[in-house]
Image: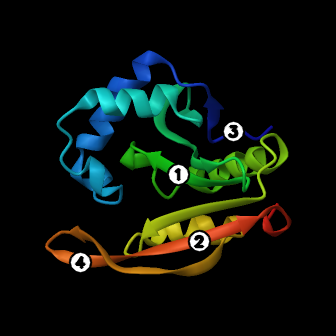
């Protein structure tokens, strides 16, 4: 019997503090949205996690290790944006992200009846590029020199997927 690498569950209040700790780690937050680079008001993070459209806690061996889900939903066009944050760095590169992306995207298409799911990431982040490619996301374009990290401007890649493109 194969042991599952991760479990998804609803977020609970105690996840918020751990997630904020992930966001305070420069190795984690360097890849995230510009808004989390210098957090001053943690209540916004709590609202984002607890009251967002579709959010799931990621667990490994019954411990909270990150968050994934769909946001920036356009219900009329049936489009949302995928996101993932794995804050436990010792679990990076273990296949958890690949499994999570497929689970969340599959749920978005089958249960939420989305037509298209978008995502984006900073181009130096090869690991997140790989999980998107493995899932079947297709390149749509770049936002050139979009984010300032480590004293340089870097590009953001935009990708998307339709239900029939999802790899098993």
Locate residue 116 relative to residue 6 in the image: left or right: right
User: Could you say where residue 157 lies in the image, as x and y percent from the top left?
Assistant: 48, 75
**Residue 137 location, quadrant:** bottom right
How crowded pointer 1 is (Cα within 10 Å; few <14, some 14-19, many 20+) is rated as: some
Mark 2 touching mark 4, by CB under 8 A?
A: no
**Does 92 sit above or below residue 5?**
below
- Element type at marker 3? loop
Question: Which marked residue is nearer to the observer: mark 3 or mark 1?
Answer: 1
Mark 3 touching mark 1, by CB under 8 A?
A: no
- Say which residue label 1 marks: 83
Question: Which marked residue is nearer to the observer: mark 4 or mark 3?
Answer: 4
- Say which residue label 4 marks: 153
- Say which residue label 3 marks: 4
Q: CA distance from mark 3 to mark 2?
A: 27 Å
Locate residue 17 relative to residue 106 in the image: left or right: left
Question: Which marked residue is nearer to the observer: mark 3 or mark 2?
Answer: 2
**Which label sits on residue 159?**
2
Which residue is outermost to the left? 151
**Does 65 sit above or below residue 108?**
above
**Residue 149 location, quadrant:** bottom left
């Amino acid at each position: 019997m194969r042991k599952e690498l991760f479990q998804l569950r609803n977020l609970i209040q105690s996840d918020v503090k751990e997630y904020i700790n992930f966001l305070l780690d420069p190795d984690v937050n360097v890849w995230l949205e510009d808004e989390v680079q210098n957090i001053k008001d943690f209540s916004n993070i709590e609202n984002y996690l607890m009251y967002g459209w579709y959010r799931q806690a990621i667990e490994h061996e019954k411990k909270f290790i990150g968050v994934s889900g769909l946001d920036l939903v356009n219900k009329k066009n049936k489009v949302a944006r995928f996101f993932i944050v794995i804050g436990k760095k010792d679990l990076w590169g273990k296949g958890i992200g690949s499994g999570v992306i497929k689970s969340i995207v599959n749920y978005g298409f089958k249960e939420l009846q989305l037509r298209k799911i978008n995502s984006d990431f900073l181009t130096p982040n090869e690991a997140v590029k790989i999980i998107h490619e493995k899932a079947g996301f297709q390149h749509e374009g770049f936002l050139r020199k979009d984010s300032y990290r480590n004293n340089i401007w870097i590009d953001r890649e935009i990708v998307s997927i339709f239900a029939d493109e999802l790899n098993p």
